[in-house]
Amino acid sequence: MIGRLTRPPHPVLFALLYEPPMARAHKDVLPYLLPIDAAHVVMLAERGLLAGAAAAAILGVNQELGDRLERGDDVLDVPAVHRGVYFVYEREYITRLGDTIGGAAHLARSRNDINAAIARMRLRERLAALLDRLAGLVDAMASRAEAHRQTTMSGFTHMQPAQPTTLGHYFAGVTFELLRSIELLDRAYDTANRSPMGAAAGFGTSFPIDRRRVAELLGFAGVIDNSIDAVSSRDFAAHVLHALAMLGITLTRLATDLQTWSSVAYGFIGWSDDFVSTSSIMPHKRNAFVLEDIRGHAAQPLGALVATMTGMKNVPFANSVEVSAEATSHLWPALDATATACELTALLVANLEVHPQRAREFAAASDTCMTAVTDALVAEHGLAFRTAHEIVGRAIREGAGVAPEPLHVRIERGLAEATGATRAVAGRVLVQALDPDACVRAAEHGGGPGPDSVRAQLDAIAARLDALRDRSRERRRDLLSSTERRRAAAAGIGRAAARRADRDVPNSV
Amino acid sequence: MIGRLTRPPHPVLFALLYEPPMARAHKDVLPYLLPIDAAHVVMLAERGLLAGAAAAAILGVNQELGDRLERGDDVLDVPAVHRGVYFVYEREYITRLGDTIGGAAHLARSRNDINAAIARMRLRERLAALLDRLAGLVDAMASRAEAHRQTTMSGFTHMQPAQPTTLGHYFAGVTFELLRSIELLDRAYDTANRSPMGAAAGFGTSFPIDRRRVAELLGFAGVIDNSIDAVSSRDFAAHVLHALAMLGITLTRLATDLQTWSSVAYGFIGWSDDFVSTSSIMPHKRNAFVLEDIRGHAAQPLGALVATMTGMKNVPFANSVEVSAEATSHLWPALDATATACELTALLVANLEVHPQRAREFAAASDTCMTAVTDALVAEHGLAFRTAHEIVGRAIREGAGVAPEPLHVRIERGLAEATGATRAVAGRVLVQALDPDACVRAAEHGGGPGPDSVRAQLDAIAARLDALRDRSRERRRDLLSSTERRRAAAAGIGRAAARRADRDVPNSV
Amino acid sequence: MIGRLTRPPHPVLFALLYEPPMARAHKDVLPYLLPIDAAHVVMLAERGLLAGAAAAAILGVNQELGDRLERGDDVLDVPAVHRGVYFVYEREYITRLGDTIGGAAHLARSRNDINAAIARMRLRERLAALLDRLAGLVDAMASRAEAHRQTTMSGFTHMQPAQPTTLGHYFAGVTFELLRSIELLDRAYDTANRSPMGAAAGFGTSFPIDRRRVAELLGFAGVIDNSIDAVSSRDFAAHVLHALAMLGITLTRLATDLQTWSSVAYGFIGWSDDFVSTSSIMPHKRNAFVLEDIRGHAAQPLGALVATMTGMKNVPFANSVEVSAEATSHLWPALDATATACELTALLVANLEVHPQRAREFAAASDTCMTAVTDALVAEHGLAFRTAHEIVGRAIREGAGVAPEPLHVRIERGLAEATGATRAVAGRVLVQALDPDACVRAAEHGGGPGPDSVRAQLDAIAARLDALRDRSRERRRDLLSSTERRRAAAAGIGRAAARRADRDVPNSV
Amino acid sequence: MIGRLTRPPHPVLFALLYEPPMARAHKDVLPYLLPIDAAHVVMLAERGLLAGAAAAAILGVNQELGDRLERGDDVLDVPAVHRGVYFVYEREYITRLGDTIGGAAHLARSRNDINAAIARMRLRERLAALLDRLAGLVDAMASRAEAHRQTTMSGFTHMQPAQPTTLGHYFAGVTFELLRSIELLDRAYDTANRSPMGAAAGFGTSFPIDRRRVAELLGFAGVIDNSIDAVSSRDFAAHVLHALAMLGITLTRLATDLQTWSSVAYGFIGWSDDFVSTSSIMPHKRNAFVLEDIRGHAAQPLGALVATMTGMKNVPFANSVEVSAEATSHLWPALDATATACELTALLVANLEVHPQRAREFAAASDTCMTAVTDALVAEHGLAFRTAHEIVGRAIREGAGVAPEPLHVRIERGLAEATGATRAVAGRVLVQALDPDACVRAAEHGGGPGPDSVRAQLDAIAARLDALRDRSRERRRDLLSSTERRRAAAAGIGRAAARRADRDVPNSV
C-alpha cells in the first residue's frame, strides 16, 4: 500500500500501464534514475539534510546497482504487483537498508521532478549521438561537394533545365539547409540541458536544498527557475521534434533530386549493385529504393511533432501524465527514424557514382546557356536586359522547326530589329556563352557555382561544422567531469562515514 | 544473386533495412504470405498454368510451414545475407523442391501485389479485433447511460453551469459521436478488404489468371479493378487512421469531462483505489491519472495520420517503398494505441462511482433552472421569450447582493415593468421550474434528457451496435469459410496429383 | 444589455471577435439563418406554440429580408456596439414588430443549435458545389484515359522503367483512388445533413416542438438524436477535411508524375504556351508551374485537418466556441483550396498534349519488355519462373558492355546452362515479347493495361460517376422541394392569419 | 509576349493564379519590391554595371511610385491580361522610360531571388510587430505575477489539489515557457533576415555584382551563401511556424487553467461583464468564452506548420512555386491568429479579477498541506520521508468517516506504531504546517512559490524581456538606417547624373 490507497492497481491497468514501462526500465529509466538519486543524496548530505551514514549507505547501494546495470544485469526485484518503477526502485533500498535509511532519500523530491530529469538526461544522450551522426552527414555532403565542384550539370527550376551549375554547388546548397536544422537541434540540446531537480512535485520545498549542486553533479548547464515550469513543461520535446521534422523535409528534397537524376531518363548518377534492389518479377530492374526509405523515415518526425503538440494542447499547466509521459513518448521513435534516415543518406551520398559526361551533355543540349547568351548581348552590345531576353526568346522560338537557321543568324535578326543596326554576334562570344563549363566558371557572383564561389561556401560549411563538433566535444567533457565529480563526492561521503564509524567504535583494533 | 544484381546489399543497408523486417516476419508477414501463396498456386493449377503435381508439392510445403508457424516455430532458415523476406521464403521451397518446382509459383505475381495483399489482410485482422473492442466500449457507455438515465446533474456550456441534464444523457451524446467514427472504421474495413492479387508488379499479366478466384480463396470481398491502383495506393491506411484519430479526439473530450467532474472542486464522480494513483510525496493524493493516459494514447493516431499522408505526398502513383512500406508503418502503433485507449476508457466508464447527491445539489445551486423559469414565464404569462429572458436575467442580476429579495419578487417587478400589469408568479410553477429533476423530466423534446427521450436515444444506439456486431460476425464467417475453401481446394489438388502419380506408376503394388 | 450583463464587450474584444463575423454575416450567416428562423417559426405556429398572427408577422419580415438579401442588399442595421450577429438579427424583428412579436421566435431554440444548423447548411451547399466539380474532374480523367487507351508508355516503379502500360491505364488507376475519396466526401455530406434544431442550448426543451418538421422544412435528411451531441459535435468537419486531404494527396501524386513526364528529360507530355510560364531571366524556359500550384493547394486540407482535430482535442463535450466556431473555421479555406486544385487539374488533364512516339520509344529502349521475355521463356520452354528470371537477368547483365552479343544468344546460353539442352529462342516469340505495344495488348489480366481490361475499368468508373451524379441531382431536388415546402407553409400561415384578422374586424367593409 | 511564349495564360489560370496575387500586390508585394529594386539599381550603378543616367532615371520612378504607394494610391496600371505582378511592375518603367532604360534593371537578378527577398522582408516586418506584442504579453503576465505573489491558492497536479502555491508563482511558471518560444521566434528572425539577392534564378551571375551592398541597403544582416539555397529554401517559414505553434500550445494550457478556475465550481477568478458573454436562452449565463477563442486561434499555427512542411516534402531542392509561394502562404494567417490569441490573452490576464479568499479556503480545505505535515514529521521527529508519508497517508485514510478523530491523534498513533515510542505532534508545528500561507512562505527552495523565490524568478523574466526589447529596438534602428542609406545612395546617383547631364550640354544657357 502506498499512502492513502488501500488497493493495488486494477489488473487491466496494471497490464496496460504499469508493466510496459517496467519492461523498459532497465534501458530507459535506471541509467538516469541512479545518478539522479546519487546526486540528490550527495546534496542532501552536504546540506546536512541527511545523516552522513545514511547517505553513505544509500550511495553504496546506488553504486552497486549502477555497476550491475552496466554489466547488463537485472537489478530490480520486481514484485508481481506494484505501483510503478520508482516505488520498486525505492523498495530495493528499503529491503536492503531498512525503512529508516532506505526510505530517507525521498526528501525534497518527487517523481515529478525526477521524471522530468530522466527525460532530459535521456534526450541529452540521444541528441548527442544524433548530433555526431549529423556531423558525419554534413561531412559526407561537403566532401562530395568538394569532389564535384567541377562536375557540370544542368541546374533546374520547376523540374526544367535552367542554367549550368555543378553537382558540388547543389550539394553545398542542400547542406546549408541541413545545417540550419542541425544548429537548431544543437540549440534545443541547451534548452533541454537544465535541471528540474528540486522542483519536487512542482511546488519546490521548504528544505534548504542546493539545486545548483544537483545540477552540477548531473552535468546540467543550469537549473529551471520555476518549479511549476520544471514539472509541467516538455516544450523541449517539441523543439527537438521540429528540428528533426525540418531536417527530414530537407532529406526528402535531396532524395527526390537524387531519385530523379538516377532515373533512366536522366542517368546523371547511380549506385553500384550493393545499393540498389531488383524486382522479383522484372529481371532488368535496378531500383534506388533506399531513397524511398529515406523519405519515409524522414517524414516521421512531423507526425511525431503533431502527436506531441496535440498531446500538450489544453492540458493544465501542471504535472500531467498526458504531457510528461505520453506527449514525450513520440520523441524516441522519431530520433531513431532520423538517425536511420541520416545514416542511409550519408551512405548513398558517399557512394554516389556520377556520370559527368551524361550530365554535361544534357546541360549543353537543353538550352541551359541561353541566359549566358542573353547576358553576353547585354555586355557586348549594350542592350537592356529585357530587350536581350526578348531577342533570345524569339530566336529560340524560331529555332523550333525542322531545319532552323543557325542561332547567331536568328539572334542577329532580332538584334537588327531591336536596334535598327546590323551587328555580328561574335562567334567567340557565342561559343563561350554556349559552353556550360564556361558558364559555370563565370558564375562566381551571388553565391553561384563558380569554383571560387563554391570554395568559399565550403569553407563556411567547414567552419560551422567545426563549431558543432567543438560544442559536441565540450558537452561530452562536461558530462564526463560531472560523473567524476558525482563519484568523488559519493566516495568522500563514504569515507567520512567510515571514519565516523571508526571513531564511534573506540575499542576497535 | 538475384536477376541482374551481382552483389548483396551493403552491410549498413542490410542492418537498417533488411534485418528489422526479417525479425518481424513470422508475426507480420508469414501469417498472410502463406495463405496468399496457397491461394495463388491453387488458382494457377485450376487455370492450367501450373502442373498439378508441382502445385501439389508446393501446397504440401505451404501446409507444413503453416502448421509449424501456428505452433510458434521459426519456419524460415534465414541466411546470413539475403535480399528480403520474400526471397528467403521462396528459397525455402527451392531448397526443398528444387528449382523447377520450387521456383515455379512466382508466375503472374510480384512482391508488389503480394505486399499489398499482406497489408490488407493484416489490417483486416487488426481492424476486426478493434471493432469488437469498440463494440465493447459502446456497450459500456450505453449501459452506464442506461444506469444513469435519472442521475440529474448540471449540464455545461463553456464550462459554466447551463441547464439540468442527466449523466445518462451525457453518455448517450458522447456515444453518438463515437459511433460515427466506428461506423467510418467499419466502412474502411470494406475499402481495405479487396484483393490486389493479379496486379503483379502493377501492370497485370498476360497469363489468363482468375483473380476473383484468388480473392475468394483469401476472403476478400472483391478485387481491385486497376493494377496500378492495386500496387500504388494505400489510401485505406489514411482512411483507417482518420477514423482512429477522430475517435481519439472524442475520447479526449470524454476524458476531459470525467477529469473535471472527478476533481475535488466538482466531486460528481470518482473511482475506487484500484483505478487511481497517489503521489510519492503528497500523501493525500488520489489522481485519476488514467484519464491522462487515455488522452495521450488517443492523440497518437492524428500524428500517425499526418505521417502517413505526408509520407504519400508527391510520391509517383506507382509502386514505391515510401508508400507501401513506410507510410503504412504508422498504422500499426496507432491501432495499438487506440485499442489501449478504448480498453482503459471502457474500464473507467464501467467502474465509475457516481455521487448523485453532490451532482444534483450543484445543479440546484448554480442557476441551471433559470431557463426553465424563463420558459415558464412564456408558457404561463404569454410573454415573448426575449422579454421573459430579460426579466429573469435582471432578476438574477439583482439577486447578487448580500440579502437579496426573493426571486419571485424580483421577477414580479420585472414582469410589472414589462407588461404594465401586476401579476403573481405562481409558487407551484416556480418551484417546479426550479427543481432540476423536474426540469430533466420535462425536457423530452429536441433530443433532451427527458427519460423517454433518452430511452429512444439508447434504442437507436442499440440498433446501430447490433448492426456493427452483425457485420462483424458475418466477416468472421466469411474469413473462416474462405480458409476452409482454400484448404479444400489445396487438398483436392493434392489428391488429384496423388491419383495421377499412382496412374503414372503402372506396376506399383 | 442582454440578460444579466450590464456592459457591452470590451472594445478590443469587439474589434477582434465581434466585428469580423459581422463583416461576413451577409455571406456566411444570413443565407442560412433566415430559412432556419422561418422553418422554426412555421413549426412553432403549426404546434400552437406561437400565435398565428405573430408567426405570420415574423415570416413576413423574414421573407422581405430574404428577398433583399438575394438582391445583394445590406439587410441588417448594425449598431455601433452589439453582442454578435444573432442579437442584431433578432433586434431587426423587435424594431419592426415590437417586443411582443419580434422577441417571440426564440422559443425552444438557442444560438447553439442555430449555429450548428448554419454550419451544416453552409457546408452542405459548399460540398454540393465541390462534388459537382469533382465529378467534372473524374470525367476529364476518364475521357483522357479513354483517349489514351492505346498510348503505350513505360510504366514505372521506384521511378525506373518497369513494364509497358498505357497513359489511359495510368489515368484510370489514379481515378480509382480519387473516386474513393470523393465517395467518402459524398458520405460525409450525409453525415452533415442532419438537423440539430430543437437541441436548443444542448439540453432540448420542454416545449412540445416537432423537430422532424423543422428538419424537413430545411431539407435535412433527419435529426440528430441527442441534444448534447447536436451542439457539441462538429466531427463532420473532420470527416470532410479528411476526404479533402486524401483527395489532395492523390492530386499531388498525379501532378508529380505529370511534372516528371513533362520534364525535358522525359518529354512524354506537355502543354501549349497558355498553360506554361517562362522566366524573367532565362529566355528558353517553359515551366509547367501550375502543377506546383496544384500540389500546394492540395496539401492545404491536411493542415486544416490537423488544426481542426487539434482544435477539438480536450474540449469538454459541450457547446464551446473552440469547437463550434474555431475548429470549423479551417473548413472553408480548405474547401476553396481543393476546388482550385481540382479545377486546375481538370484543366491541365483536359489540355494535355501527348507525344506518343517519344513515350513508346522510351518504353522500347528501357528494357521494359524483359518481364514479357521472361514470361515467354516460361510459356514456351516450360521453365520455372524463377529460373527464367535468372536467365534474363543474367542476359541483361551480360549485355552491358560495348558490343554485346545479341540478346537471343545470351538467353540461349543461359537456357542451355539451366536446362542442359540447347534450344533456340524463337525469333517471332522474342520479337513479340520485345514489342511494347504487343505487351500492352496481351496484359488483359489482373487489371492490366490490355484494351479490354481498361475498357472494363472505364465502365466501372462511369458507373460510379453516374451514381455520384444521381445522388447529387437527388440532393438538389430535396433542397429545392424543402424550400418550396417552407415557403408554402409560411404562405399558408400568412393567409390564415389574414383570414383571422379579417374575421376579427367585424365591421370592416 | 514574354520570351519564347506566344500566348497569354489560359483564362482559368489567369483567374485562379494571376488575379489573386495581383489583387494583393499593393499590400504584399510592392512595399518590398520597390526598395529591392532600388537597392539593386544603386548597386548596379555603383559597380558600373548600369549607366548612372539610366540608374538615376529608374530610381526617380521608383521614388515616385514609393511615395504614391505610401499615400495609398494604386501605382500599377494593370492590363487586362498579364504574366504576373513583376512583369506589370517592370512594364511601368518601360512605359515611362522606354525599352532601353526601363528594361535595363533586370540584370543579374530574377523573380526567384526577388520573391525570396520579398518573403523575408515581409516576414521580418510582421515578426517585428508580433515580437513587440509578445513582449507586451510577457509584461502583462509578469505584472500579474508580481501583483499575486502572495495570493495563495491550491496548486494542482492531475487536476487534483496538490500543494499550496500562489497565483503569481503559477503565472511566472507559464511565462517561462512562453519566453522560450518567443526567444525561438526571435532567433528565427535572424535566420530569416539574410539577403538572397544576387542568387538570380538560383545560379548566381557572371556580372561582378556586390550582394553585400544590396543586403546592407535593405537592412539584411548578411547574405545567403549559396544561390540554390537562396531561391529553394523557405525553412525559416517552418521555424517561425514552429515557434508560433509551441507558443500557441502554451496559451491553450494557460487558457484551460483560467477556464477551470473561473468555472463556478472553482470560482478563484473571474472577469467583469465586458469580458464575458451570456446566452440567448439561458439568462443566468456568464461565459468566459474568450478563452475558447484564444485556444482556437492558438491551435491554428500547428495546422499551418503541417501544411507548410508537407508542402515542402519531396519537392526538388530548386526554385518551385510549391515552396516559394504555396508553402509559405500558411505563414501569414498563422501570424494573424497568433497576434489575436496574444492580444486576447494579454487583455484577459490584465483584467483578471481574483477571489483570493475563495482560493485560499479551497487550498486549506483540500489537504494541500499534507506534504508540509509530512515534511514536519521528518524535520521534527527524524523520520524517514517514506515512513512519514505512510503515517500521514494512513491518517488521511482514517479521517474519511463521519466523525473522525482529530488529525494529530491519528498521526500520533501512526507515529507510535512506526517508531515504537509515544510522541506528541506539537500543536504549533501542525498548525503551521496546515496553514497554506505559511507553506507558501516556506517554499523558498527549488523554484517554489516562496516570496523571495518568485522575486528571483520575476527578475530573471524581466532580464530576458529587456534583452528581447533591446534586440527589437536595435533591429528597428537597423531597418531605419538602411532606408536612409538607400535613399542617400539613390539621391547621390541622381545628383551625379544631373551633374553629368549639365556637363554634357555645353551650350546650355
Image: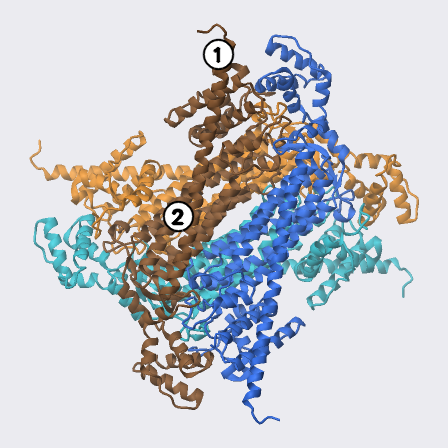
Chain colours: A brown, B orange, C cyan, D blue
**On the image, numbered disc 1 is attached to which residue?**
A502
Disc sitting over residue A456 in the figure: none
Going from the N terminus, do you reach mark 1 or mark 2 first?
Answer: 2
**Image x and y of residue A209, in percent:** 59, 28
Instruction: From this view, report whether residue D45 is shown above or below residue A301.
Output: below
Instruction: From this view, report whether residue B457 is shown above or below residue A459.
Output: above
Q: In what element is the residue under mark 1?
A: helix
> In this view of the protein, which residue sits in the foreground, B477 or A265?
A265
Q: Chain of mark 2?
A: A
Q: Residue furthest top?
A: A507
Q: In what element is the residue under mark 2?
A: helix
**Image x and y of residue B173, in percent:** 62, 40
Please identify, in this view, whether the residue under mark 1 or under mark 2 is nearer the observer. 1
Name the quadrant containing residue A155: bottom left
Q: Is residue B64 visible?
A: yes
Q: Is residue C302 visible?
A: no
**Image x and y of residue D85, in percent:** 54, 72
Instruction: From this view, report whether residue B16 is shown above or below residue A100.
Output: below
Q: Amino acid at mark 2?
A: Ala
**On the image, numbered disc 2 is attached to which residue?**
A135
